[in-house]
Image (cartoon, rainbow, N blue to C red):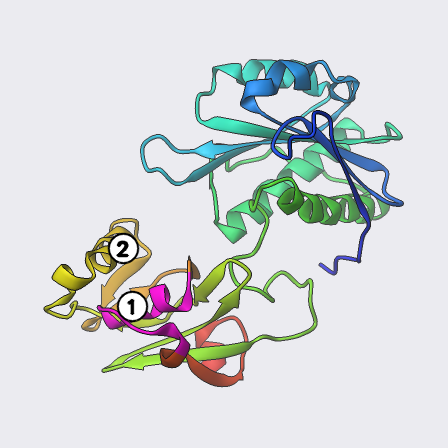
Amino acid sequence: MNIASATITLFLLRGDAKGLRTAEISNWSGKAVAAPRTEIDDLLSREELEKSGVYILTGTDPDSGSPRAYIGEAEVIRERLKQHKTKDFWVSAVVFVSKDENLTKAHVRYLEGRLISEATRIGRFKLENSQASGSKLPESGRADMNVFLSRIQQLLPVLGSELLVPIAPGTSGTSSVVPAALVCRVKDARALGQSTPDGFVVFKGSTAVLLERPATAKRQPYIIALRKELVANGTLTESNGLLMFTKDTEFSSPSAAASVIHGGGANGLTEWRTERPLNHDLHQREG
């Protein structure tokens, strides 16, 4: 999905960037209203919440510590959000409505389905509701709602949520530029990845050494801990005497990624080397 350039107007009602705020895009009929849970009553008092729309609740899974989200829709957002006060995981809410009141029940059900589908595909958050009722729309309606969805994708990061930000740049269809992949090799392990705005992503199908270096536990215990975490959550699985990445995985830096692959401290600035421009799938890259 190609996303056009945009002028965004962000209004901080109390001057607090994380407090109650609204966001609009020029020449777009939609509007976002966001607030932390601590200001839920102020959010519920907003007149925008009398309308139909979609909403996103985000927080942390209390069991796993991983990001967690709930995506919903309602004809009257205020009444639905009141019901979610009993959910304890979420700490922030974002609501999307239409300023011209042209969002029907069918429209918001379609948007909910697309949002859930995109968030599931990207995989940054564990969704509390991974199934949506969805809605069938005529071709013109789908086109309008897909534009609405693209604007939601633009606004969410501005409002502090990476729910719909692809882990690997260039995989969302928002750019015609194919990023150059970088390769990291050690022994029989080979990994492909690239820099991201937040650090570095290692692509699905990449491999890391199975065992850590003997001195790593003493000198770099954080590497041991990170590798164990990735194995425990299924990101790394043993395959043919190596550890294989089961999904695109983002790290805080190129060195953190290289260290996991090496099983010990590694300088990401020298270990990641230029590869030719490649497609997102690892096997397609190698072809």
Residue wearing tag 2 = 226
Horizontally, is 73 left or right of 207 in the view?
right
Q: Is the magenta stretch mostly helix, strand or loop?
A: helix
Q: Is residue 275 above or below residue 227?
A: below
Q: Distance between the residues labelled 1 and 2?
A: 10 Å
Horizontally, is 45 left or right of 224 in the view?
right
- Amino acid residing under circle 1: Ser
Q: Which residue is drawn at 51% across and 27% down?
A: 91
Residue 215 visible to the viewer? yes
Quadrant of the image occupied by residue 41 = top right
Classify 10 Å Cα crowding around label 2: few (below 14), some (14-19), many (20 and above): some
Picture coordinates of residue 99 (x, y %)?
Answer: 85, 30
Q: Nearer the viewer, residue 159 or 136?
A: 159
Which region is colored magenta? 253-269
Horizontally, is 166 left or right of 258 in the view?
right
Picture coordinates of residue 155 (x, y %)?
Answer: 70, 44
Q: Is residue 268 magenta?
A: yes
Picture coordinates of residue 258 (x, y %)?
Answer: 33, 70
In what element is the residue under mark 2?
helix
| In contact (CB < 8 Å): disc 1 and disc 2 | yes
Question: Where's the N terminus, which quadrant?
Answer: bottom right
Residue wearing tag 1 = 259
Picture coordinates of residue 88 (x, y %)?
Answer: 44, 21
